[in-house]
Image (cartoon, rainbow, N blue to C red):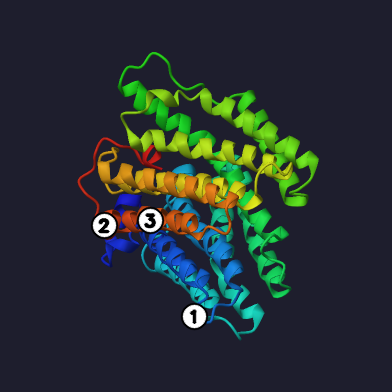
């Protein structure tokens, strides 16, 4: 049975016809809702019996709650392209969405529940994704994606560590949070290092550009190696001089890597330049965290260059692009979608500045407002795209969309 035949046999809601649909939609809704709730918690109110302290809940809601849904949507859509096997769809897909919702509910109202039950519900989806990814890689003999499986395993381990550290009151800057953040940043370096130059090359080639992105070579592998070392140092000793040196080196190395991808030629198409902007946030985040390790800037603001900038913008870029391509729509961003990208960049800048003035909550509120506009806007604009049947196919391959 082909993917098209399998899709035609599905008679249920279009939302569950492909992995990106429910997970991207719920990712956007959750990102907006969680930020609104965080502002309420900052005001001193406690409307829900959350399982963690307010600060711990905030970081967990985005690093492990939001990102787990985005990663699920991406992998369930991309892995069939990588392996040539059938995607997960229909009620099995609905079951995976249910696991994610149970995890969010457990953390949201789990105060007083046994700690193991909250952790078990929250870890159900990441463990299911690991099993899915391992099966697809082994069955399809797609060994080149074993690093993705390893990073997913680290991400799940980090979530479990976060729960254990939260029980001891040490999760806000614990190993679990740093390991989870490092695992996803490394995913951006690995997968972003494939898709950013690839999509840029496709777009430039259609316009008969003479200068195209440099293909992946040993230099890129070296940059990935430096990136991995810097992230390991960040997890082990975030405030050490060695960490500062490695992060500064990784930041410069990734800026050099990004410069080889011809991003300055992509200005007319937001769907392409946003990928370059997001990868730039990864590089700038290394520089900021390195500077923070040397006490040249606050840690909180520095890390949000990664959290809001690299992770937030790259996931928004991937969700907007993949949703259009797999829904059979043209790969071009409208002005409202471009405005979403600009809103998220503004949220990152405001949050960085807020780190220098922690007593000035107006910058925090401004950053949160831009964040809600970005992801609330995504949910509103993409609701019909994600919940309705696929349009007549355009001249876009599945690999280009993902």
Residue on which disc 2 sits? 8
Residue on which disc 3 sits? 375
Q: Is residue 121 visible?
A: yes
For mark 2, does the 10 Å Cα neighbourhood hold few (<14), some (14 to 19), or many (20 or more) residues? few
The Cα–Cα distance between marks 2 and 3, rounded to whole angstroms, is 31 Å
Q: Is 307 on the left or on the right of 272, as rendered?
A: right
Q: Nearer the viewer, mark 1 or mark 2?
A: 1
For mark 1, does the 10 Å Cα neighbourhood hold few (<14), some (14 to 19), or many (20 or more) residues? few
Name of the residue lying farthest toward the top:
210
Q: Nearer the viewer, mark 2 or mark 3?
A: 3
Residue on which disc 1 sits? 48
Identify the element where label 2 is drawn.
helix
Pick the front one: 137 or 256: 256
The Cα–Cα distance between marks 1 and 3, rounded to whole angstroms, is 22 Å
Q: Is 102 on the left or on the right of 301, as rendered?
A: left
Q: Earlier in the sequence, mark 2 or mark 3?
A: 2
Residue 316: percent from left, percent from top: 41, 48
Please give the name of the residue rendered at 28% of the width and 37% of the height, measured from the top-left corner.
Answer: 332
User: Where is the C terminus found, in terms of image quarters?
Assistant: top left
Pick the front one: 318 or 215: 318
The Cα–Cα distance between marks 1 and 2, rounded to whole angstroms, is 42 Å
Q: In the figure, residue 274 lies in which quadrant?
A: top left
Please give the name of the residue rendered at 31% of the width and 23% of the height, measured from the top-left corner.
Answer: 206
Q: Earlier in the sequence, mark 1 or mark 3?
A: 1
Q: Earlier in the sequence, mark 1 or mark 2?
A: 2
Residue 129: percent from left, percent from top: 54, 60
Identify the element where label 1 is drawn.
loop
Q: In the figure, residue 180 lies in which quadrant?
A: bottom right
């Amino acid at each position: 049975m082909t993917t098209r035949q399998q899709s035609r046999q599905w008679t249920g809601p279009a939302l569950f016809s492909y992995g990106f649909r429910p997970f991207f939609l719920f990712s956007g809704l959750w990102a907006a809702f969680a930020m609104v709730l965080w502002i309420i918690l900052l005001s001193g109110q406690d409307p829900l019996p959350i399982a963690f302290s307010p600060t711990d809940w905030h970081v967990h809601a985005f690093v492990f709650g939001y990102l787990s849904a985005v990663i699920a949507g991406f992998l369930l859509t991309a892995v069939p392209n990588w392996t040539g096997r059938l995607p997960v769809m229909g009620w099995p897909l609905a079951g995976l969405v249910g696991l994610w919702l149970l995890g969010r509910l457990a953390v949201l109202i789990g105060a007083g529940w046994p700690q193991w039950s909250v952790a078990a519900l929250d870890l159900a989806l990441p463990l299911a994704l690991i099993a899915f990814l391992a099966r697809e890689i082994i069955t399809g003999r797609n060994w080149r994606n074993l690093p993705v499986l390893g990073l997913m395993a680290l991400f799940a381990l980090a979530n479990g560590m976060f729960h254990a550290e939260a029980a001891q009151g040490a999760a806000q800057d614990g190993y679990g949070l740093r390991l989870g953040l490092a695992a996803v940043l490394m995913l951006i370096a690995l997968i972003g290092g494939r898709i950013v130059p690839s999509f840029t090359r496709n777009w430039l080639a259609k316009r008969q550009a003479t200068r195209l992105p440099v293909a992946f070579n040993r230099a890129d592998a070296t940059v990935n190696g430096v990136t991995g070392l810097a992230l390991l140092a960040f997890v082990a000793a975030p405030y050490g001089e060695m960490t500062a040196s490695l992060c500064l080196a990784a930041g410069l190395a990734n800026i050099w890597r990004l410069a080889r991808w011809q991003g300055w030629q992509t200005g007319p198409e937001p769907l392409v330049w946003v990928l370059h902007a997001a990868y730039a946030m990864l590089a700038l985040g290394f520089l900021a965290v390195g500077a923070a390790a040397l006490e040249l800037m606050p840690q909180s603001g520095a890390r949000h260059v990664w959290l809001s900038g690299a992770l937030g913008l790259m996931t928004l870029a991937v969700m907007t692009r993949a949703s259009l391509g797999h829904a059979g729509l043209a790969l071009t961003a409208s002005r409202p979608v471009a405005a979403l990208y600009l809103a998220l960049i503004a949220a990152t800048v405001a949050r960085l500045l807020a780190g220098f003035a922690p007593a000035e909550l107006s910058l925090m509120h401004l950053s949160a407002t831009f964040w809600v506009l970005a992801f609330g806007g995504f949910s509103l604009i993409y609701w019909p795209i994600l919940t309705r049947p696929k349009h007549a196919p355009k001249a876009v391959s599945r690999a280009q969309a993902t």
